[in-house]
Amino acid sequence: MNEKSAPAATPAEQEQMIETARMVLAMLGERDIRLKQHSERVANLCANFCEKAGILSGDDLLHIYLAGLLHDTGCISIPREVLTKDQPLSDEEMLLIKKHPVVGVQILSHHRRLEALLPVVRHHHEAFDGSGYPDKKKGEEIPLGARLIQLFDRFDELASNCRNAQGMTAEEALAAIREKAGKEFDPGLIPKFIHFMESNAGKAEDYLLKKQAAFVKQSFSNILQKFSAGKIVPPVMPQVVFELRNVIKREEATVKDVSEILEKDPVLSLRLISVARSPIYKGYGDVKSVQAAIPRLGFKETLSIVVAISNKSLYEVKLPQFRVALDKMWGHSLACAYASKLISQSLFLDDPETVFLMGLTHDVGKVILLRAFAEIPQEKSLDFTTVMTAIQEAHQSIGSILLKRWGFGDEFSRVVCLHEGTNFSPQTVKEILVVHLANMLTRKMGLSSFEWDGKNPVEVASAQLLGLSSDTLGRVEEKVKEIIKDVAHLF
Ligand SMILES: [Fe+2]
Ligand SMILES: [Fe+2]
Ligand SMILES: [Fe+2]
């Protein structure tokens, strides 16, 4: 690798190299899927090894990973029958196989940015004692990258299902490699290699995903720190919500008091009217004004809808790659809110509207994290699951801080902190159980970033503690689906 150091690649160039490598690899996979899998294992193991053993760093690590993916590119020129032949090869066929390092270089030399990989590709079948091919190079004349790839390439051949598979166990393969130190392999690399393979138990962890996960995790931990230190200004709850909350607390509050507050915000008023006119609230009669909507909805339900409308703006970002994720989160939060309310009603809890708000805000931490993450410049096309896993780990603390700042009581923070919990008991507060169950039901409805595990919802711990029947849960599920279809876009 460092034999010829090219100027460092920009993130965009790195991305381009990775895409090119994936394309070539897909072509190789068409020829022989085992070859593609072999190349991926070699790349992941070798890059993880070089990083862990401190042999390479910076761009050289990416180069060795790509060289691992592309070392057998030249096999594209070998007919499928030869590549996949299980019997011994004829001399002629062997000659074809032996050309692949040179053919690989010819193909890859068309991409200027892959120049650093060419010596590795050309020399990955040389042997330390000079008995390899194509140039019979020996010792340190063989580029370091090629000596590294060669180790993992041969190990994979000995112990995997690729063409030359020799069906050895990992231990047997390592013993065979140790025996050829100084003949085929660089003896200086062997001890570290053996140590790595033994401690790693031969697992080829995806190198790029691992890098991404580390980047994403670090980004979220920076966001949390900045948020706690007040360096990230949290989104504010509109003044109207605070005023509304204070007014409806007063027993003598009138429709006029409430509508005066709402009418200060014409956009919010219009949305409130359109939600109140939607089919799910149609029992309240046709509504054409805020004054008409309020008495029909009731103060508490008006507040719920107003908070939901105000919350919706949190889920809006400019970047298209995050828009889809946030839209999904909005659907999830709203579904969870309505499911929480319906479950509360079926249990005759005192205040289903408050539980609606708890359901609505239970994942607010995720929204804040994703919005802050979207602000970080990034060229990488990130793996969505990696991002969501990191968000899942970090969302509870940030959500509870935010809800406190928004003036929601401790009972809301408790729901945020405990809604994922599995250690429920008969003493657990009912609202927490309700939101937990609602959150689970959204998975079954396909309105969550998590898959439903397929079991019957009555078996969920929170459903059992609440004593809910299969019928009730089925009705809640159907009703929520209907509501989401009717109103999600109106907020
Ligand atoms: Fe090869
Ligand atoms: Fe190979
Ligand atoms: Fe959730």
Image (tube, rainbow, N blue to C red):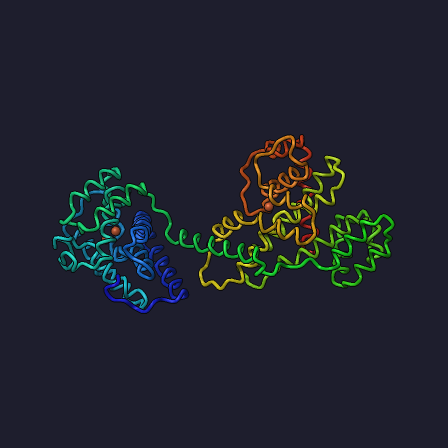
- Determine whether, in the image, residue 100 is placed left or right of residue 130: right
The residue closer to the viewer here, 146 or 476, is 146
Image quarter hosting the N terminus: bottom left
Find residue 490 and report its image quarter. Answer: bottom right
The residue closer to the viewer here, 102 or 361, is 361
The answer to whether residue 163 of the structure is visible from this angle is: no
Residue at figure coordinates x 23%, y 47% from the top left: 154
The answer to whether residue 238 of the structure is visible from this angle is: yes
Residue 173 percent coordinates (x, y): 22, 41
The residue closer to the viewer here, 257 or 323, is 257
- Determine whether, in the image, residue 118 is placed left or right of residue 258: left
Residue 155 percent coordinates (x, y): 24, 45
Residue at figure coordinates x 23%, y 56% from the top left: 146
Residue at figure coordinates x 16%, y 49% from the top left: 184
Placement of 381 over or under 281, stated as above or below: below
Find residue 122 and report its image quarter. Answer: bottom left
Residue 13 percent coordinates (x, y): 38, 66
- Determine whether, in the image, residue 125 is placed left or right of residue 322: left
Task: Determine the residue located farthest toward the front in the rendered image.
Answer: 229
- Determine whether, in the image, residue 228 is placed left or right of residue 119: right
Image quarter hosting the C terminus: bottom right
- Count of picture labels: 0
Residue 343 percent coordinates (x, y): 70, 38
Placement of 95 over or under 438, stated as above or below: below
